[in-house]
Image (cartoon, rainbow, N blue to C red):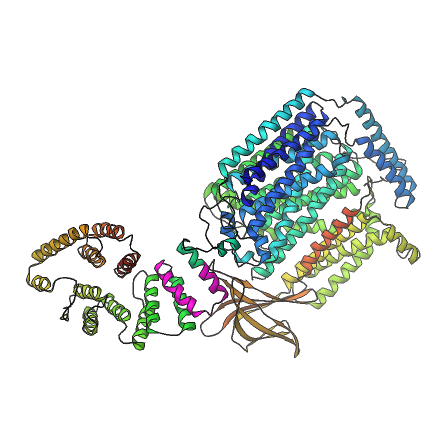
């Protein structure tokens, strides 16, 4: 409301600026040429008095200027006198009263955003609330770290968020700072390696591999580092090395390790055998029997079997969408079968299914990222 | 509310400008005083609203209101306050708002102080001013609106281009714009004269001081920009004949010519039609400069954004105003009354020569700048016209100009005596010859042209002093009497002497810097020593440092000469995280008029850093010259006397006089 009031006041002021001279019947006729020449004549007298010009020059100048003065006076006499025309003034007043508001509101309503208030930063930081978009919070933390670059905890908090937002280069820097200021650890090295991979588009580069090796040196059982070292081996074409690494991981791992299915799937991909699972494993990648059976089948039969399993899985997930692992398996299966379109639509379905559950969504994204899909 | 009020104020200013464009013209046509006076109050109100709009944008930048797209794109909450303010015009939209603010300021000044102008002239001038203003308001509102909002404001801005985060941004653009836009006044006067079909004495009386003011600002603005480029870009160069620099040089050359022809017109009532044409050309070149810089035709530090619609819009403005005013000139100029007569050898004649040389120089710059662009548009072929072209065309034009400069003030109005002037310049000539001989002997075997150029500079400086000495009759009458005469000299005379001497000073700087510049380029480790021009610079070490919105690597050099410590220099390299950009902060050590200059290159992994060290002899004189010129202009501007040029009376047998135009 105040805004419109201010606009109204401003408009009135503008209109007033046009109407004011129209209302005055002053006889302000401005300067004239005659005055200038008179001033010049006076100037010559002053110049001569102070000795800047000689008497002869002064006389010559006086003659010149007087001639012009006469001509100017003659001209002024012949000019029509300044008059007033009431009709024209009224027209001008109407233009101001109608035209100004029309032009102003026409332009303003097309371009302006009258409903938007001001957002000075000082006021906004005071009422930082939970509803702010993640990007804003990240920016705040970044601003804080810009001023306090040695805050290790800050970097530790920021780094995974940046990684998840896909800002891998920044995440790499953040992890490096976290390691510098908050101490080295296998987890951080592994995360750093993962971020480096992310910035290389999912390829385990030499830099990333070096970080994973450092992580393993710090903690031989670090699951992420070991997994990615295996992946590195796979990407290098050393499938047996990869399989050996992953088999060792699975053998050592507790039965309920959340990454178990992922590694098992990877292992199947490189053609390794999944080691015997300790009792009580809940969700193996594929039923053991099925894998064993598949080994003895012909290529075509195996394809049909896998397709059948995948279809069953897809049907099940349609009715029960909460199973994140199931979704991941489905997407992976489509990818392996070379049906990228189906994988993408499954991915979209999965996102929709778990959209309301932040925890599962996170899990899903993590998994998808490991598949080399955008998390 | 601040953002929206600012936006609305700008819209209202457009409305007022439209009324100001039409109503006063109608008033002048029907000789209605009230309608003509509408120009005055609308010009003042327009100034008020634009100023409010500009103040609103400044406030938004200072409070970091990122709901305004312009603030989000060009500011950052951690930026120091000064750069938050200067950042307002460190971007396309804001700089255009500054442009129209200054335009409105000049319009407001004419309205406020134009009491002694004839009523219809004032109405016409303000109306023309409003045409220009309306075009630019429309341009801003439609293509470059600084008040557009973002519904979900981000929490942090994208920061200002780091190269612009410097004190130079506080000075260079406002100065330059005061110059560029200041010429709009002489343009408006010229078009008003053409519309009215007459040029009266009040016209000339007004145009000269306004042109002078614009010229002073433009001179300082260009000099400041050149110095800024010199210390910020890290190359140690001060003029690159870059199209954007040329875009500012062209109005300066034309403006300098205009300044001198306006003088002839005010004092002698001659060169009227030529002055009108120069006024139009000067402002047209200012507009052209705006187009080149703002349209994205050129890519440089100055082209903040490239958007084809903007380019087309400015091109349209260009066509309408330049084409329109020149057509008007072609149509109406023949009806203007011719001015007074003078002999070819006279003060007027000298000023005509000045005008010829300056406009030709301006034309060569124009060709050198626009030919590559035109060629690219027509044939797609890319060529670059660089320093060699300009050095070969510009220098031959400036040498005769500089040779003629000392003669001008010594010639009498209407009919002069060249021989007498030459006699009075004898001392200057002798000093110049001595200077040539000394410099030649000192730098024996070096450049041959440089001593000659130094001699020319000495001639120009001494010539300016000779003129003063002549006027106060130094050494011919007792000294006390001379001093009294010196006090009595009009300030304009002093101004002329300073401005002309400034030319010589700048020339010395340019010649010395380009000829005897020495440099060291290499990579250095800590404790390495570089030797340049008798100085020893030891790299003490490299230290990282945290700034408000950047990190920097500072190198510390200890400078010694003959074993004695002179100073410590700390060049640095800054990294700006938000834009992911880095800048080089050169370190400058001033010794007299000479400077040592260090700028850092990239650091390599083995702890060495690339370093460029220059010793630039007398380099500061390049900028002292323009400052001196501007000071001369200021002196002349402060001289409120009327300018009357008393003619030399004709002898009994009058010599043949030549028509002025």
* The C terminus of chain A lies in quadrant: bottom left
Give the number of marks. 0
Judged from this view, the residue extending furthest toward the bottom is: B563
Magenta span contains residue A159: yes
- What residue range appears in magenta? A140-165
Q: Position of residue B548 (x, y in %)?
A: 54, 63
Residue B89 appears in the figure = no
Front-most of residues A11 and A42: A11
**With B404 as the anchor, is A189 left or right in this view?**
left
Q: Quadrant of residue A330?
A: bottom left
Q: Position of residue B144 (x, y in %)?
A: 52, 42
Q: Quadrant of residue B316?
A: top right
Front-most of residues B436 and B557: B557
Residue A60 appears in the figure = yes
Q: Position of residue A244 (x, y in %)?
A: 19, 72
Q: Position of residue A367 (x, y in %)?
A: 26, 60
Residue in view at x 17 percent, y 52 percent: A314
- The kind of secondary structure the magenta stretch mainly shows is helix
Front-most of residues B556 and A222: A222
**With B19 as the anchor, is B523 left or right in this view?**
left
Q: Is residue B345 above or below residue B299?
A: above
Q: Is residue B609 above or below residue A50?
A: below
Q: Quadrant of residue A46?
A: top right
**With A340 as the anchor, is A93 left or right in this view?**
right
Magenta span contains residue A7: no
Q: Is residue A217 above or below residue B510?
A: below
């Amino acid at each position: 409301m105040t805004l419109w009031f201010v606009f109204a006041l401003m408009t009135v002021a503008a209109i007033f600026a046009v109407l004011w001279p129209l209302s005055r019947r002053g006889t302000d006729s401005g300067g004239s040429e005659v005055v200038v020449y008179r001033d010049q004549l006076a100037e010559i007298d002053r110049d001569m008095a102070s000795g800047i010009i000689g008497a002869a020059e002064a006389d010559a100048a006086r003659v010149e200027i007087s001639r012009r003065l006469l001509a100017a006076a003659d001209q002024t006499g012949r000019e029509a006198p300044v008059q007033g025309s009431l009709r024209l003034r009224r027209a001008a007043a109407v233009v101001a009263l109608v035209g100004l508001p029309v032009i102003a509101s026409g332009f303003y309503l097309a371009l302006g955003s009258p409903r938007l208030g001001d957002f000075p930063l000082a006021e906004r930081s005071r009422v930082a609330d939970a509803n702010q978009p993640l990007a804003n919070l990240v920016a705040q933390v970044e601003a804080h770290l810009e001023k306090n670059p040695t805050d290790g905890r800050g970097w530790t908090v920021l780094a995974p968020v940046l990684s998840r937002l896909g800002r891998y280069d920044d995440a790499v820097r953040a992890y490096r700072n976290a390691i510098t200021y908050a101490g080295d650890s296998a987890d951080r090295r592994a995360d750093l390696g993962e971020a480096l991979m992310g910035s290389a588009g999912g390829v385990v580069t030499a830099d990333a591999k070096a970080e994973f090796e450092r992580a393993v040196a710090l903690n031989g059982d670090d699951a992420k580092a070991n997994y990615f070292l295996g992946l590195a081996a796979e990407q290098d074409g050393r499938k047996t090395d990869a399989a050996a690494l992953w088999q060792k991981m699975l053998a050592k791992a507790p039965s309920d390790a959340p990454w178990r299915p992922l590694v098992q799937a990877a292992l199947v991909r490189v053609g390794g055998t999944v080691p015997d699972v300790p009792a009580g494993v809940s969700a193996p990648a594929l039923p053991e029997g099925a894998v064993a059976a598949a080994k003895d089948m012909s290529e075509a039969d195996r394809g049909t079997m896998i397709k059948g399993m995948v279809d069953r899985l897809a049907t099940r997930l349609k009715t029960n969408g909460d199973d994140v692992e199931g979704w991941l398996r489905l997407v992976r299966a489509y990818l392996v079968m070379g049906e990228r379109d189906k994988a993408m639509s499954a991915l979209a379905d999965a996102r929709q299914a778990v959209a309301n559950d932040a925890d599962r969504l996170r899990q899903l994204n993590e998994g998808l990222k490991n598949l080399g899909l955008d998390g | 509310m601040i953002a929206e009020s600012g936006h609305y104020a700008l819209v209202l200013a457009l409305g007022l400008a439209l009324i100001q464009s039409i109503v006063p013209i109608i008033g002048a046509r029907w000789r209605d005083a009230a309608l003509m006076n509408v120009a005055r109050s609308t010009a003042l109100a327009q100034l008020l609203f634009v100023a409010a709009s500009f103040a609103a944008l400044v406030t938004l930048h200072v409070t970091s209101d990122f709901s305004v797209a312009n603030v989000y794109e060009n500011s950052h909450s951690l930026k120091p306050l000064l750069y938050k303010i200067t950042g307002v015009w460190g971007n396309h939209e804001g700089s255009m708002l500054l442009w129209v603010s200054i335009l409105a300021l000049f319009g407001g000044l004419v309205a406020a102080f134009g009491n002694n102008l004839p009523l219809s002239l004032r109405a016409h001038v303000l109306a023309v001013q409003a045409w220009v203003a309306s075009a630019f308001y429309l341009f801003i509102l439609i293509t470059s609106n600084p008040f557009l909002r973002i519904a979900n404001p981000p929490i942090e801005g994208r920061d200002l281009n780091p190269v612009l985060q410097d004190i130079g941004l506080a000075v260079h653009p406002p100065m330059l714009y005061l110059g560029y836009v200041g010429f709009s006044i002489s343009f408006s006067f010229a078009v008003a004269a053409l519309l009215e079909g007459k040029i009266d004495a009040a016209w000339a009386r007004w145009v000269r001081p306004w042109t002078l003011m614009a010229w002073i600002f433009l001179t300082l603005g260009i000099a400041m920009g050149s110095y800024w480029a010199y210390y910020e870009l890290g190359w140690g160069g001060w003029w690159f004949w870059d199209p954007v620099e040329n875009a500012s040089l062209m109005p300066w050359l034309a403006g300098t010519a205009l300044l001198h022809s306006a003088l002839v017109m005010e004092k002698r009532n001659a060169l009227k039609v030529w002055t009108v044409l120069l006024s139009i050309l000067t402002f047209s070149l200012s507009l052209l400069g705006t187009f080149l810089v703002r349209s994205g035709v050129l890519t440089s530090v100055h082209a903040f954004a490239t958007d084809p619609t903007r380019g087309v819009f400015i091109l349209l403005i260009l066509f309408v105003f330049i084409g329109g005013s020149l057509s008007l000139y072609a149509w109406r100029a023949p009806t203007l009354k011719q001015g007074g007569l003078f002999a070819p050898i006279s003060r007027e004649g000298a000023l005509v020569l000045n005008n010829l040389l300056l406009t030709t120089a301006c034309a060569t710059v124009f060709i050198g700048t626009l030919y590559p662009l035109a060629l690219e548009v027509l044939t797609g072929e890319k060529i670059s016209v660089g320093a060699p072209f300009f050095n070969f065309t510009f220098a031959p034009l400036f040498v005769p100009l500089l040779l003629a400069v000392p003669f001008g003030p010594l010639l009498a109005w209407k009919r002069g005596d060249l021989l007498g002037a030459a006699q009075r310049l004898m001392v200057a000539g002798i000093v110049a010859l001595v200077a040539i001989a000394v410099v030649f002997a000192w730098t024996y075997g070096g450049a041959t042209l440089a001593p000659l150029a130094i001699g020319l500079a000495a001639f120009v400086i001494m010539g300016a002093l000779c003129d003063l000495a002549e006027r106060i009759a130094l050494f011919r009458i007792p000294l006390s009497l001379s001093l009294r005469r010196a006090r009595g000299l009009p300030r304009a005379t002093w101004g002329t002497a300073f401005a002309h001497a400034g030319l010589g000073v700048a020339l010395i700087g340019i010649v010395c810097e380009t000829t005897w510049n020495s440099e060291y380029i290499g990579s250095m480790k800590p404790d390495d020593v570089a030797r340049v021009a008798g100085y020893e610079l030891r790299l003490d070490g490299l230290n990282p440092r945290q700034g408000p919105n950047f990190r920097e690597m500072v190198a510390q050099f200890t400078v010694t000469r003959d074993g004695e410590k002179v100073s410590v220099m700390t060049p640095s390299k800054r990294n700006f995280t938000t834009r992911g950009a880095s800048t080089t902060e050169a370190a400058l050590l001033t010794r007299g008029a000479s400077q040592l200059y260090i700028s850092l290159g990239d650091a390599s992994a083995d702890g060495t850093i690339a370093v460029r060290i220059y010793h630039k002899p007398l380099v500061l004189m390049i900028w002292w010259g323009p400052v001196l010129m501007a000071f001369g202009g200021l002196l002349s501007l402060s001289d409120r006397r009327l300018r009357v040029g008393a003619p030399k009376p004709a002898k009994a047998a009058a010599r043949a006089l030549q028509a002025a135009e």
